Image: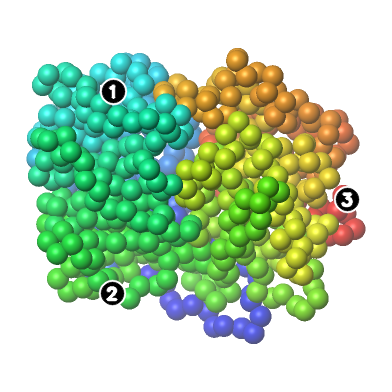
Amino acid sequence: MSAGPVPRSAAPRKYTIEQFMKTIRFGVADISPDEQTVLFSSNQDGVFNLYEVPFGGGQPKQLTTSKTDAIFAIGYLPDGRILYSSDQGGNELNHIYLREKDGSVKDLTPAEKAKFQFAGLSHDRKSFFYQSNERSRAAYDLYEMDIATMKPKRVFENPGGFFPGDVSPDKRYVALVKPYTTTNSDVYLFDTQTKETKLLTKHEGEVNNGPEGFTPDGKSLLLSTDEGSEFAYVKAYDLATGKSTVLDKAAWDISADYPSYKGRYRVVSINNDARTELKIIDTRTNQPVRLPALPGGDVTGVNIADSEGRMIFFVNSSNSPATLYSFDFKTNKATPLVRGLNPEINPDDLVSGEVIRYKSFDGMEIPALLYKPKDRKAGEKHPAILSIHGGPGGQTRLTYSPLVQYLVNNGYVVLAVNNRGSSGYGKTFYAADDRKHGDADLRDCVESKKFLSATGYVDPAKIGIMGGSYGGYMTLAGLTFTPDEFAVGVDIFGVANWIRTLNSMPEWWGPQREAMFKEIGHPKADSVALYNKSPLFHTAKIRKPLLVIQGANDPRVLKIESDEIVVNVKKNGVPVEYVTFPDEGHGFVKKENEITAYKAVKEFLDKYLMNPQTAVR
């Protein structure tokens, strides 16, 4: 545990990226069967590993010591042994591993070139379920693994087009979701006895339906739907009568809705304007549980023990990384177990994100998160960088980003744009960029420059664009299709060639591939349109400095995408910097690599955006 924060100075102290990256990122956390210990995964030693900490607080104990592949906690088995997930160098082909109490490890799913995903403990706690594409690379089957023998059996053989969901407490039914597009899907119920598959969500038009999970009594299946609504809400489907009743509804999307093991509590998460609004409802009174005062921020990762007397959760905000808490329902006491913030950093020096909105080219209101340097002086103009999320249907939320804080701490204004097509703002907004990628959504980003200029503290000639994955595509599209709008671009594993990217989508995406084809375009039927929106084929237009960051093992955006962009743009005589990582995939799991990348981002921005002598206009 850390000492107190450093004393507050008159002006915010400047911190290195190494200091910002001493913050801890967490994975899943779980409570041991005896409820005395909390398991979690974190990258505090540089690579994600497993740790345990006493429920009441104390010094964490490291359980695994991987220096290469990230290890993510799944949870405890009822006998106290541990399950975890790990891939190989970021290739996303995760396997499920069993860690014995003596520390020995066994790969329970050793098949090569297959992906395995944990799907929950059985209600009788004698087995667990997992999904695998071992039989068919493009379809996930559902398996049950007996805990006593560690021998699996197939529960549902996927004919294709489905993703398996929750299993009923009596193990008779399996909930399935069938996506057609990114805004249209159905829920089915598979009967393991009769082998029949029944449609539960017959509808017309574009409606997103999905299974949330069965109730502990096995009588109902909770369904998420946006039928007749801009936002997702939750219904309870009665398995005996086939009738549905609305269970939870809000003015925003309900992003999660699940019961505790015995059903005493229901955990409801609402995506309220880029923040998570949490309710833990006591089902006996239908009233929310009053939690003790906590630091401001999102409460996420709520995990209630089987006894329903204890739980754990994380608290995260835009100016504070996650802290892991334990909570006792009897005493109403919350205990911080592991704090994510580096004690060398004064929390008062960090910047909170502010939700703002501006009108785009067609009048559509665009939400964004604004981060302003704390040491702004009257009349001073700062450079600004747009931060564009991945997806295309992602959402930038008010959670902690070391890169954002690092840039703002060094004098940059950061505006994280949730352009049209972002999730969380209703299904009309979500679908507003369909077949318009690199056009309407890019114009939303361009329009944000007017808002930034109007603040009075942003230099309109020094606005850059940055993003990862789909945000990387938006960066490349910005420099290509609006070559005079952005002073620089930072592309982090971004799509450059839609035709190749869509053709090379991993097989395990299954029906999501078809949904993506319908949203963005089919690589064959829409090849002309995809060619026109792919920056790789129009690189002659790029004339502003570009930084490209890429993981060599990326299975989604192949390294050749970035290789070719760099080669082509260099032909223009434009400054291009290229940073690659041989041991990363689509994103960072190794802290050392993340430090190298973010240091490169700041040095690049300092050289071409901050410094007026070297900036290219």
Say whether residue 182 is visible: yes
**Left or right position of 335 against 404:** left
Spatial distance from mark 2 to mark 3, Cα to Cα? 53 Å
**Left or right position of 494 against 267:** right
**Along the polypeptide, which appears first: circle 1 or circle 3?**
1
Q: Name the residue under label 2.
A: 292
Determine whether the residue tagged by mark 1 lies in a helix, strand or loop: strand
**Along the polypeptide, which appears first: circle 2 or circle 1?**
1
Q: Please report the residue visible at 39 percent of the width from the left and 18 percent of the height from the top.
A: 137
Spatial distance from mark 2 to mark 1, Cα to Cα? 43 Å
Where 67 falls versus 396 (above or below)?
above
Q: Please report the residue visible at 71 percent of the width from the left and 61 percent of the height from the top.
A: 451
Q: Which amino acid does label 2 sit on?
A: Pro
Spatial distance from mark 1 to mark 3, Cα to Cα? 54 Å
Q: Please report the residue visible at 84 percent of the width from the left and 45 percent of the height from the top.
A: 484
Determine whether the residue tagged by mark 3 lies in a helix, strand or loop: loop
Crowd rating for badge 2 (residues with CA inside 10 Å; few <14, some 14–19, many 20+) = few
Numbered circle sitting on residue 141: 1
**Left or right position of 382 against 588:** right
Say whether residue 466 is visible: no
Q: What residue type is labelled 1?
A: Asp
Residue 235 position by quadrant = top left
Q: Mark 3 points at which residue?
A: 617
Question: Residue 459: horizontal and vertical position, in percent?
Answer: 80, 63
Question: Residue 178: horizontal and vertical position, in percent?
Answer: 35, 27
